Amino acid sequence: MHSSIKKIILHRVNMTLKNPFHTSFGTVQSKDFFITEVIDHNGLSGFGESVAFTTPWYTEETTETVFHVLNDFLIPLTLSNSFNHPKELNSIYAQVRGNTMAKSAIEGAIWDLYAKQLELPLYKVIGGIRDKIDVGISLGIEENINDLLDKIKHYIDQGFKRVKIKIKKNKDLSVIKEVRKKFPNLKLMVDGNSAYTLNDIEQLKEFDAHHLMMIEQPLAQNDIIDHANLQAKIKTPICLDESIYSLKDAQTAIQLKSCEIINIKVGRVGGITEAIKIHDYCLENKIPVWSGGMLESGIGRAHNIAISTLPQFTLPADLAASNHYWERDLIIPEVKVFSGEVKLSEKAGIGYEIDREALEQFRSNKYEYIK
Ligand code: OSB
Ligand code: MG
């Protein structure tokens, strides 16, 4: 790094989604999370975001565990070690087991700062090869099928490149059939968020008749073996999301044939460096990848946009415009989608200014750490 880190700020933020998002593990309506800010000697700031929710239903981490791990371990490690490149953080943070969401929150801010010091857009610093990315929409479970069909039509009309629908037991095959009846050629995929077990195999086999692009995370988050058993028996490609925290997990899953596609969320895998490693391994092994989302603010979203420019991100990201999620976002300008594409910003770092006024408006607490 050109200049070392002088100060770190954790901004605890509360934001309410425009619409509640229903998944098999529960409903997300408001988000209580951390924005990380790292400041160098010249007063330049880099920003990151923690994607953890307040409950451990998706994976183990929560807003509170992220605070504990950042406050007690990762921030002290960051301030007491010197490093020349954000890639070195992976080994500095290795003495903290797991806690990949906490790691990603601070690592991402340092990558942003590093790119700003170089006066280059982050996507170019990490080796991105495209200046616009394809996006698809992720739609939550709807009580009423007509509401879902109306939403799908709305997003197809806006040009989104594919539609993902959340499913759960008894809200799956019948829903897929209705969607297919109305949209026979739609690029469609489903996300189970671990709602199934191998006992549901007969039901899951029936999905094969509906040419889905993939089924995301049907089985438990900690079960790579059962996914391999399931993939051997169904034609629909399995995409792993919650099961993949690291390069090691990706290697295990691919070698055991537990999936044919991987959803890489920077916020879930410990940061940009690990996301690049998973990407490179998937490229070598011809496994297509795409960027998932965690209903992030614009700051986390900007990191997801940057990673999506790497060559093997060949499938549309789960990523919509700022105004799909929020009345007011934390960045200027907001993320915009035109014809199912997001254009990369050529500004330094994540490419968006932080809306300081919005950050203050939504902030519930602030913690400062000085070297
Ligand atoms: O499984 O991909 C998921 C949202 C919250 C938790 C888990 C998931 C999701 C999404 C939303 O699918 C993607 C988005 O940010 O639009
Ligand atoms: Mg998912």
Image (spheres, rainbow, N blue to C red):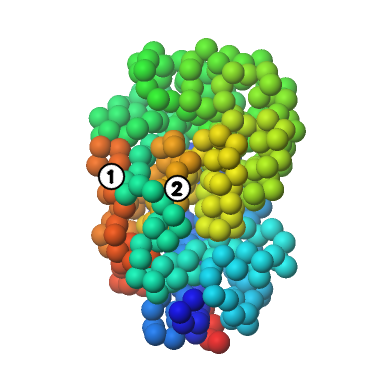
Q: Nearer the viewer, residue 281 or 228?
A: 281
Q: Residues within 10 Å of mark 2 (few under 14, many from 20)?
A: many
Quarter of the view holding residue 283: top right
Q: Residue at x 44, y 32 (%)?
A: 164
Eyeballing the image, is 103 above or below 164?
below
Quarter of the view holding residue 320: top left
Q: Which amino acid lies under the numbered mark 1 shown in the image of this protein?
A: Val
Task: Kindly give the residue lying farthest to the right in the view shown.
Answer: 225
Q: Residue at x 39, y 58 (%)?
A: 124
Q: Nearer the viewer, residue 260 or 10?
A: 260
Q: Nearer the viewer, mark 1 or mark 2?
A: 2
Q: Name the side, left or right, on which 74 lies relative to 15.
A: right
> Residue 41 location in percent, x, y?
44, 86
Quadrant location of the C terminus in the rendered image: bottom right
Residue under label 2, please give it.
310
Tell me, for residue 337, which label it has, or none: 1
Q: Which amino acid lies under the numbered mark 2 shown in the image of this protein?
A: Leu
> Residue 355 location in percent, x, y?
31, 68
Mark before the other along the chain sequence, 1 or 2:
2
Q: Secondary structure at mark 1?
A: loop
Task: Kindly give the residue lying farthest to the front in the view shown.
Answer: 284
